[in-house]
Image (cartoon, rainbow, N blue to C red):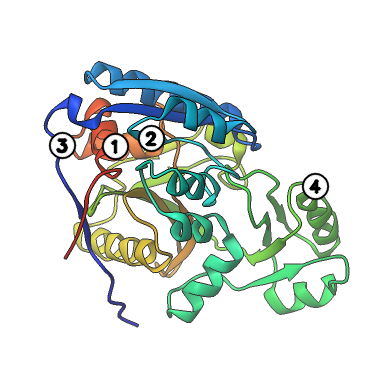
Amino acid sequence: MKQTSIKTAYATVSRAEDFGRVAVLMGGLSAEREISLQSGQAVLQGLRRKGIDAFAIDVDENILSTLERERPDRAFIILHGRGGEDGVIQAVLECLHIPYTGSGVLGSALGMDKLRCKQLWQGAGLPTPAYALLDQDSDFTGIVKSLGLPLIVKPVHEGSSIGMSKVDNADQLEPAWVNAAGYDSEIIAERWVQGSEYTVAILQQQVLPMIRLETPHQFYDYEAKYIADTTAYHCPCGLDSGAEKVLQALALQTFHTVGASGWGRVDLMLDAQQEPWLIEVNTVPGMTDHSLVPMAARTAGIEFDDLVWRILETSGERING
């Protein structure tokens, strides 16, 4: 189904002083705090190398009073997970009339919510694996019969693969739900897609070169993302240019469908028949110098410091066309 979306451009900023005083919001209280601190320090140093008057705020429960005291001209949001990627900090900044990077309240909230994302994609006719919502009253045997095996069990509102596990036999499904329920009150079981995993970074309206992820782990889990040295990243991704362009267009459509904007990442799988399956939208991806978005940007000829500048531009005037 062809979707019509609003294309948003951002006013170009040519002088560092035109950004004003920039608060880099990092840390936070989510399970992804440590990764956010790493991303935040990388962003902070990149902005400063470009001559921007940037300073760090480690976000805590006093963030409202901190922002009222500091009164930055803009905010660069590099908070991963709940409280920073789900529309909460975006709403705070809206109330204080502080411009900020990336997606707004709605796009952030939907992007963080795996269940509502999938429901929205299904309604828009976009391909995403079949799933079932799990709770203590679930018919786990019936879910296995309906979806088949293997399955992947996920907390609905966590990132960085936190709380996720693969289910290879029926006896593993309930324990996987119990494990995931330690992180969230809403859990889904999703049909496993056997194939290659790709990620598509989006910067303003530019779709960056795709990256193919390769790991010896069962899936691209927390350890594969942040700890293991056995994960391989292929950029260029190895697809022919025509196939890559089709998937890039699908990723951009997916991004717009959930109301995301500015910058972010769409994760997808290609199965054995080369059919695409949408997995997730990430509206505040990792931004260390070895993260996926900077990697794709470098392949497109955009170095890290220029990348953070262009992301900061998304906090400015939006021109719809």
- Label disc, if present, on residue 13 of the rendered structure: 3
For marks 4 and 2, give the CA distance: 30 Å
For marks 2 and 1, give the CA distance: 6 Å
Among the two numbered marks 4 and 2 on one chain, the one whose residue lies closer to the N terminus: 2
Q: Are marks 2 and 1 in contact (CB under 8 Å)?
A: yes
Q: Quadrant of residue 191?
A: bottom right
- In the rendered view, tell whether residue 262 sits above or below residue 124: above
Q: How many marks?
A: 4
Q: Quick check: can you spot residue 168?
A: yes
x and y percent of residue 177 in the render?
A: 79, 57
For marks 3 and 1, give the CA distance: 9 Å
x and y percent of residue 151 in the render?
A: 68, 62
Helix, strand or loop for disc 4: loop
Give, as a three-letter code, the residue at label 1.
Leu
Query: Residue shown at 58%/61% (left/top)?
Result: 114
- Label disc, if present, on residue 76 of the rendered structure: 2
- Nearer mark to the viewer, of 4 and 2: 2
Give, as a three-letter code, the residue at label 2.
Phe
- In the rendered view, tell whether residue 131 sits above or below residue 212: below
Query: Residue shown at 61%/66% (left/top)?
Result: 115
Q: Residue furthest left?
A: 14
Q: Are marks 2 and 3 in contact (CB under 8 Å)?
A: no
